[in-house]
Amino acid sequence: MNMSAAKAKMREKKMRNQPASVQYPESSTEYGGGADHPVTGGGQSNVRPFSKRQRAPPNRSGWVRGHQKDGGGYAREMPKYITAGAFARARAAEVSAMLKAVTKTTASSHVFQTLPKHMRRRAMSHNTKRLPRRLRDVANRMREKSLLASSKKKKEPAKSKSRKARRRHGNLLLEFNRRQRKNIWLETHIWHAKRFHMVKKWGYCLGDRPTYKCYRPCYRAMSSHCLLQDLSYYCCIELKGEEDKLLAALSQLTSKEGGPTFAAAMCLSGGRQGSVTVHRAGQYPSQPLGPVTYLWRPQTAGLTHRQLWIWAHPTLKQDLLPELQSVCLCSEAVVTPVEPEVSCAEADLTVQVEAQSENISDNKLKPGAKRKRSRKDASEPAEKKILGDGTRLPSTPVTWKSSSTGIVINDLTMEIVRYRLIGPQSHSVLAETLEAATVCDASMVERKSPFLWWPQHCKDQSNISLHQQQTDVFDLLKGICSTGELPPGTVLGLTVDDPRLTLPQKKVKAVPFVSQAQEADEEKRRELMMRGVPQQCCQSFLWDQSVRDNVTDNKISEQELNRTKSELLVPGSRLSPTPPQGRVPILLVHQPGKQVGNELNSWGAGWDLLLPKGWGMAFWIPLVYRGVRVAGLHMSLKHSQNKAAPHFPHDYPDCPAGARFQEEQEAEFLDKFRRRPPAKRTNYIKHGCLAPFRCPWQQLAEEWELLTTEGGAEGKGYGQTESTTKTDVIEEVTSQQNIAATNPPSCFNVLRNRKSLRLLSAWCRPTASKGKRQRPGAAVPPLTPSAVTSFNAAHRMSLLWVRLTLLSKGNPEAHAMVCVPTAEDLKLFSKDKAGSGPQEPPHKDHFKSRINRKKKSSKKAATSLFSTDDRASDPITPKDPQSSSDLILGLWPDPLPSVTSHCSRVTLGWITQGDFSLSVGCGEALGFVSVAGLLNTLLNQPVEHRGKLLLRNPTSLHYRFVKLNIDV
């Protein structure tokens, strides 16, 4: 029997001061009574143990208190001989230990404990005068010794500054700068941290969702007013060089089959923003990297040198930037000039001059005035707010150039602030928040400092004329009813005044500007909605690095602006004249809404506002004061879901960033699953769900490729319910996998060919997509086995992005299975379209008994650790791949069986995001299906039921009928 906790504690207390030479065994019998323990009690001895006993004593381990009936387990016979030297050493160690224990006092021994119990008093522990005279000196010495020992061991805790000291501007700024060295903060971080749940993602600290309930209000804002988001974490990569060389390099990353490229005529002029999916150089359609948006600077007449901005997600930047450097041959890093360090002598001289100036200023201070704190040590960091990327080292290169092509690549991450306004009244919010900059006259130019950029630009009459044209176009936006009426991707450059000058006293909701405009203005407005912004009005000084730095460095501080406002005669009125530092160049980029399908066209359209860094909060607060709703990362996902558009990186499984996201999501879900008690977990094995936390796309594509190649799916497209058929399919797939194990399979990819997508959309009848519309003279080929075979040969191992609409009640969830209905299911649907779908028969958990046996065997092994019989009786041997400690109750272990034929209905794919859609009024799901499996299903389905599939959530056995839509 093991020693109890109380006995073990008592033993530890009594043996605390024993020397290391004396051994007290715990696992053997009592002192001297075991066959393996010497009589000497610590020294080495050659004593021969006795071989016979009257009765075997009980097996005890460790020290046992009190007298035992059987003699305490000691030997009843004396040994025949002992070794004198070892015996003497053992006895000497015991005597030394006894003397040490008597003379040394422990932490719990006090002088008053030597007194009889009737003479002890509680006050003796802290007042030595209550002790007898003969013990006072000893008690005082012990008290001084304990105080000295405690002062040496315990370090004095650092005195934390008071809240008032910590909230001082200088200390607060240093603390914020320190916290930005690990994760990048946006300029609106403090504002979001007070109102949002913050998450650390992609090297940034971002707001995920508000702390208050606002899901439906955010949807109403996107549908009827305006929703505001901070997208400054998106990375901007700038390319400069000759136009033909830039296009030649970028053409290696794209293909015309996937849609417009970097060379699209509408975007190349600089009047529209474009979007494209980039691949590794020359690898289309495989090895995609992800989607990017790009914007060309409007071309200047007579110049071939162009400038291009590419905006990418932060998880895509680590893959995109090396690829751009490779195709542009930009391997030479340009070292940024480092500011010269100040020598010690110069620093001392500076400190002396500052001290003298402080002494002079101290004499001039008025009574009661506050003195501004200054740095006492020149080595302290400058109290300056970090703007941009605070995690980047000064020696990290941000510019690369090519000596052969002349192309220069600049990393402008966190150099440009980007806000997104979503909703039909986004233009009304911008019209009330922004005001075109006032032109400086010649006298002001002469009086003001020459380092400000706006007065210098006002000297040129062409700049004033361009600014006036941009102002007129911006005024026309006020009369537009909805943001979705404008052409998608329209760009407007503008210079505006500081919006803090026109900040309202209270929050007001921006409303559309309705007026009876003249016929001339109405004609201009109609032309704006049809053709977009004129090309010359797309130019902006935000493209110039020198102008951006000038605007950032000369921004008016909040303190100075408030001081100027306090001097106004009428509180709340605008400052006049406008300070010359308060002119900011911006870019307005139109964001198209939903562009696929016939339902809710242009839903979710809005504007992107691009600003120079340092001006984030100066524009953020005025926008919030116009009644917008502010959202985070969660609503970005819902915005993409309502537009039926894939969201990066969630819905890009064939990209490196998408694969990394799937691994992180699986680890997060698995950790959450393990934290729940086993009795409260969902048994996914019984629900027939192989992968509830991930989607094995590669295995799905491989299995459908084998089934369609060998003809194994013919006659089984609806998914047979007989066990024999399912067993045959599993055996066939397993044999094919064993044959193909020698040759490495090709990786899957998502179908992005526009022509093929239109063909699939036409075959999937009835459909609600634009692919249904047939152009005059363009006949759609019929869906025949030969057409399916040729299509599969052209797009092997491909997945298809689909939208599924539930035909009855239900709420789809992530990782739900998309399955093929049987002929009986379709007949049931024809009789009762509003009825519930079929049921999946419960599966048997074959691993539950193994896990239980494993637990029982582990308990037996713990009780009898040295027993070999228990280890031999373990039913799971180490050679079994499913006997590892990673076996979890309710989850299938790796490797997974056949994912297509595991359930009673054949699996086509999975859902990546699904929820109840407020825009449609029913459940909607977005995901991927196998192209080969879908074509086989459509070929075997009746025409009237073509496109009808089944959907089942991972935690349910109930199938729901859904309608398949391929939006192009």
Image: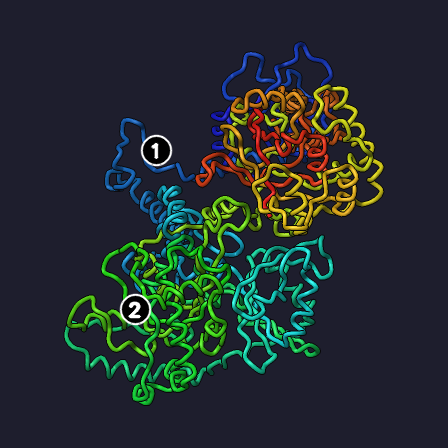
Of 418 and 373, nearer the camera is 418
Residue 32 shows in this picture: no
Tell me what residue is drawn at x 53 percent, y 36 percent: 672
Question: Mark 2 is on which residue type?
Answer: Glu
Q: Earlier in the sequence, mark 2 or mark 1?
A: 1
**Mark number, residue 93:** none
Q: Which SS class for mark 1? A: helix
Badge 1: few (under 14), some or many (20 or more) residues near its Cα, within 10 Å?
few
Across and down, in percent, residue 799 comes to 68, 43
Q: How is the image coloured?
A: rainbow
Query: Which type of secondary structure does the marked residue at label 2 adopt?
Result: helix
In percent of width and height, residue 613 lies at 43, 68
Front residue of 557 and 221: 221
Examine the rendered structure and indicate whether residue 626 appears above or below residue 144.
Answer: below
Q: Quadrant of residue 59?
A: top right
**Is 454 left, or right, of 835 in this rendering?**
left
Instruction: In this rendered view, identify the residue nearer to me: 257 or 916.
Output: 257
For image coordinates 40% across by 65% down, the residue present is: 523
